[in-house]
Amino acid sequence: MWRRTYLLLLLVRVYFALSPSYLHPDEHFQGPEVFAGRIYSYPSLLTWEFTSQHPIRSVFPLWPVYGLPMGLLKWFYNETGFTSPPADLVYYILRAGMFVMSFVFEDWAIHELVPTPRYRVPAVVLVASSYVTWTYQTHTFSNSLETLLVAWGPFSLVVLVAFGLLFTAVAILTDSLFYRSFSLEEAIRNPVITPLNNLRYNSNTLNLAEHGLHARYQHFLVNLPQLLGPAFVVLVLHLFTKSRVLHTFYNGRAVSAISATMILSIFPHQEPRFLLPCVPLLLTCIRPLRSRPFLVSWLLFNVAMGYLMGVYHQGGVVPTQLEIPSIITSKLPAQASSENAGTNVTVFWWKTYSPPLWLLGDDNNSNNNHNTITNTIDLMGMRAPEMISRIDSAVPLCHKNRPSSSDLVFLVAPRSATFLDTYTTTTSTAENTRPLRMQELYTYKKHISLDDLDFADDGVLHTIHRVIGRRGLSVWAVEREGCLT
C-alpha cells in the first residue's frame, strides 16, 4: 500500500512541478533572472540584492542549479545551429530539475533520517503528501535548496568540516568575480563576502521595515500552521501527552527545526518560505497516524492548498509573459518590416507579482524582424486612477498621419479588477465617457490574486465572488477612444 501511495504522490508532484504558478518574485529574481541575461540575450532585471554596493546574495550555490543547466542548453543549441533556446523550454527544464532534486535528495534524506524501519516509509509518504513538497520544493527558490542542504546536514557534517574552508574560499572568490569582475588578484585583495553583508542588512530593523515587519510570533502561530496544517495540531497536542513528548521532540530533527524557527523569529521580517527547511524535519517527528479525522483533514488541507498555491496562485503571470511576444506580433501590421522606423511597445502590468523579464526570451527569436522595442512597466498595486493616468500618458494621440505601428500599448491585469469594466465594455454610454478603450487579446483562466482581496471595502461574499468568480489574467490592447485603426 505504501509503495502505491508513494508512486501516486510522485505523479502529483510532477503535475505541480510543471504547473506555472508563481509563489513569490524571489523564485525568479533571485534565481533564473540573474543568469538568463548573462548566458542568453534575454532581457533581465537584477534586483537590489545583486546591484547594491554591498550585495547580499551569493551566486555560488545558484550557479550549479540554474547557471549550469542554462549554459549546457545554450551549448546544445549552438551546436545544432540555433542561437538560444526558447524561454519556455528553459523554464520547464529548470522546474524539472527542481523536481528531480526534490525527488532524489529530499526523499532519500528523509529515508535516512528516520532510523526505525517501522516509521521510515510512513515518514517519507507523509512528507511526499505535503503541498509544501509539491509546490515550494519544485519551484526555483533558494529556500528549496536550503531544505536539501539541511536534510543532508547530519550526513555531510564530516565533509563540511573537512572542506568547509575550501568551499568558503571558492564561494567568496566566485561572488567577488561575479559582482566586481575583478582580476583574480584583485578579488583576493578585495573580496565580496555576501553572507556577512546579508547579516548586516538583516540586523537593521529599518532595512527590514521596507519589506514589512511582523510580530515575533509570526513564524510559530501563523507560518508553521500555514505550512503544516493538521500536522501542526498533532505536534502541539503531543506537547501535552507526556508519553509522546520524548519520542516526538527529544531528537535531533525536532531540536533543529524548533531552534531554527526560534532564531529566525528574532528577525521581524518573517515569511512562510523561510521555514521550508523545517517542514520535512517536523513531519518526520509524527508517528504514523491512522485515525480517520487526521487522514481526511490532511488530505483535504493539502489538496486545497496544493491547487491554490500550485496552480492558481498568480498562475497566469508566467504563461502570459511567455505569450507576450506572440501577442505583440499579432498586433503588428503585416507590412511592417525592419525597413520601418520600428514599433515602441509598452506593456503595463497591474495588480500582479512582478513579471519575470527573462521569460520574454531572446529578441532574435521573436520580433526583431519587425524592429520592435518592448518596455515592461510594473505598476504593482497602484491606485486605479493613477494607473489609468500612467497608461493614458503612454497611449499616442490620434493623428491622421501617424503610422498605425508607431506605438503599441498593452495592459496585463486580473479579470477581478472591476475598475477596468468601464474601459472594456462596448456600450455607447461607456464609449462617450471614457478616454481609452481596451480590447481583450488573451486570457489565462487559472489565475487568482490573493493580494486583490479587499474584505473591508467590498465585504466577504462580494470579494470572494469577485476574486474567485472572475479568476483569470487578461491582456488588453489599449487605444485612444475615437481613433481610427
Image (cartoon, helix red, strand yellow):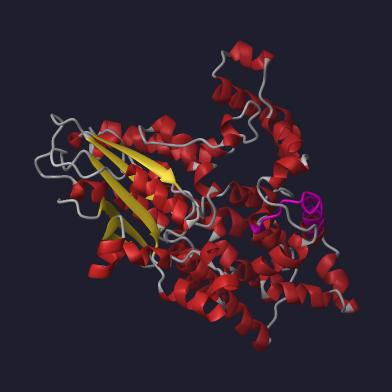
Give the image location of residue 360, x and y in percent: 34, 43
Q: Toward which corner of the image does residue 256 lie, by quadrant?
A: bottom right
Quarter that holds the N terminus: bottom right
Give the image location of residue 141, x and y in percent: 56, 49
Give the image location of residue 215, x and y in percent: 78, 58
Judge left or right: residue 301 versus residue 278: left
Write the residue at 58% across / 72% down. Answer: 455
Write the residue at 72% across / 37% down. Answer: 201
Q: Toward which corner of the image does residue 200 lie, by quadrant?
A: top right
Instruction: Inspect this view and state whether residue 102 appears.
Output: yes
Write the residue at 68% across / 62% down. Answer: 279
From which residue to which does the magenta span run?
A: 258-272
Give the image location of residue 101, x and y in percent: 53, 52
Residue lying at the far top in this picture: please name it. Answer: 185
Q: Toward which corner of the image does residue 415 lie, by quadrant?
A: bottom left
**Residue 111 position (above or below residue 95):** below
- In the image, 241 versus 429, the foreground residue is 429
Residue lying at the far right in this picture: please name it. Answer: 242
